Amino acid sequence: MKPVWVIDDDKSIRWVFEKALTRENIEFKSFVSAQDALTALNSSVPQVVVSDIRMPGASGLDLLQRLKADHPEVPVIVMTAYSDLESAVAAFQGGAFEYLPKPFDVNHAVELIRRALDESMRQTESAEDSTPAPEILGQAPSMQEVFRAIGRLAHSHATVLITGESGTGKELVARALHRHSPRSTKPFIAINTAAIPKDLLESELFGHERGAFTGAQAMRRGRFEQADAGTLFLDEIGDMPAELQTRLLRVLSDGQFYRVGGHQPIKANVRVIAATHQDLDLRVKQGLFREDLYHRLNVIRLRLPPMRERREDIALLAKFFLLKSARDLGVEPKRLSEAALRHLSAQDLPGNVRQLENLCHWLTVMAPGMNVDVTDLPPELRGETAASSELNWLLALEREVDLSFGRGEHGIIDQLSRDFERTLIAKALQHTGGRRIEAATLLGLGRNTLTRKIQELGLEEKSTTTTS
């Protein structure tokens, strides 16, 4: 639990609270001014605040206003003299939890703080339950740079070009840019320019007038109009046909467009965010993408890293997607073993975040147990080569050693060596149909040595007396 903050310029008041809270084993932090508390809010958040109203400099009401704006779940108890009733009323109107009149009874003050603590804990639990899941996760330095860029662009209207391989989350970043922009209350309209037939794309983007072409029985607003005052996300812009590249360039240059079959210009108050997995520099050189449009789109460029460049995020993302899939399906969430996580972190995951999300959904449905190991992964991720088979059994051995040490076991090498020999010999005998001479040859052992080990390991019943 976070500390209770006590803010009062009167040293004796702070001393009373410090003694009372220490006696009640309640963690606290004292401030001599509201400004000091406001500064501290930049790096930490209290569980409950107890603050005087009238202090030199910033007032308790200023602090209350900031807390209710940034941390509405934090209860604020305001202290005020009986003669300061107007301030108390203002505090309640500002969202104060309770007010404590001066002079006050210490026991009553502690009781109020305990009530506020209970309320704060309920508010925190409720907030955690209702907080929407984060759309973008990442601790890797490359993703932190993306987050910083989104933050820097929070108040910008600039056109943004997002590049990255398929499945890296380009639309999620576009939505985040919109959500943190001045246009956040206006529409976010997304269109995949590669998924719409060439002859329909123009109408989809710019709309059409009635009778503009066969089948156009009514006027239709296009995506640019639908996104008015908001954001238009043009995905896979690198695949846009040449003639539409010209029309898009005109919109970005002039700020207006015409519906198909229309003669009246329409103002385009739209922020454009484009995305592509293509190398636009190369497509420009190949004459497949207009250079002037490229420069119009490439005002701010964000590159999303593939999973192979942010392997440290695989565990974080996998846990999130397993929880999400379990919640969607109404089941208990599966858990990836350490060996499975190490194995996944060694994969390139060409489908990137989308592939990892699909994998976690598959595991939620298909994995037999609650703990997912390497052997529970799909065949294409387990790998069927000799090298991957070697990796798998070594990972399993590592896991067994970790578990043994975790159980506080000692001298495990003898037991593991016996298990290792028992497995090798049993499989060799199974492969040869119980013929010991052949099994000994496969294992590189003498016949007498093999016979002795069979007896020592209790494998007599699994072999035959066949010697030829």
Image (cartoon, rainbow, N blue to C red):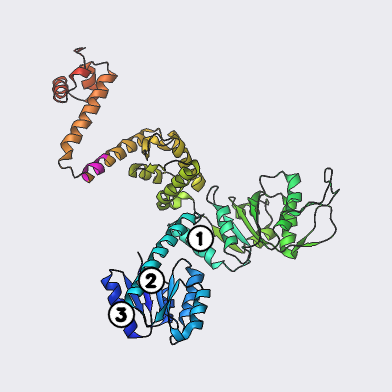
- In this view of the protein, which residue sits in the foreground, 25 or 163? 25
Q: Specify few, some or many for label 2: CA neighbours under 10 Å numbering under 14, 14-19, or 20 or more.
A: some
- Residue 152 coordinates in the image, percent (x, y): 54, 67
| Residue 447 against residue 90 in the figure, above or below | above
| Residue 442 against residue 150 in the figure, above or below | above
Q: Amino acid at mark 2?
A: Leu
Q: Sequence-wise, which precedes: disc 1 or disc 2?
A: 2
Residue beneath disc 3: 16
Q: Residue drawn at (85%, 58%), measured in percent from left and top?
A: 263
Instruction: Name the main secondary structure of what is drawn in magenta.
Output: helix
- Residue 166 coordinates in the image, percent (x, y): 55, 47
- Residue 357 coordinates in the image, percent (x, y): 49, 45
Q: Sequence-wise, which precedes: disc 3 or disc 2?
A: 3
Tag 1 secondary structure: helix
Residue beneath disc 1: 146
Residue 286 shown left or right of residue 135 in the figure:
right
Q: Sequence-wise, which precedes: disc 1 or disc 3?
A: 3
Q: Which residues are magenta?
A: 400-405
Check residue 315 for magenta coloring: no
Q: Quadrant of the N terminus?
A: bottom left
- In this view of the protein, which residue sits in the foreground, 145 or 119? 119
Q: Amino acid at mark 1?
A: Val
Q: Residue drawn at (47%, 68%), measured in percent from left and top?
A: 71
Q: Amino acid at mark 3?
A: Val
- The dot on residue 101 is none
Report how far apart the C-alphas of labels 1 and 3 lie in the structure: 48 Å
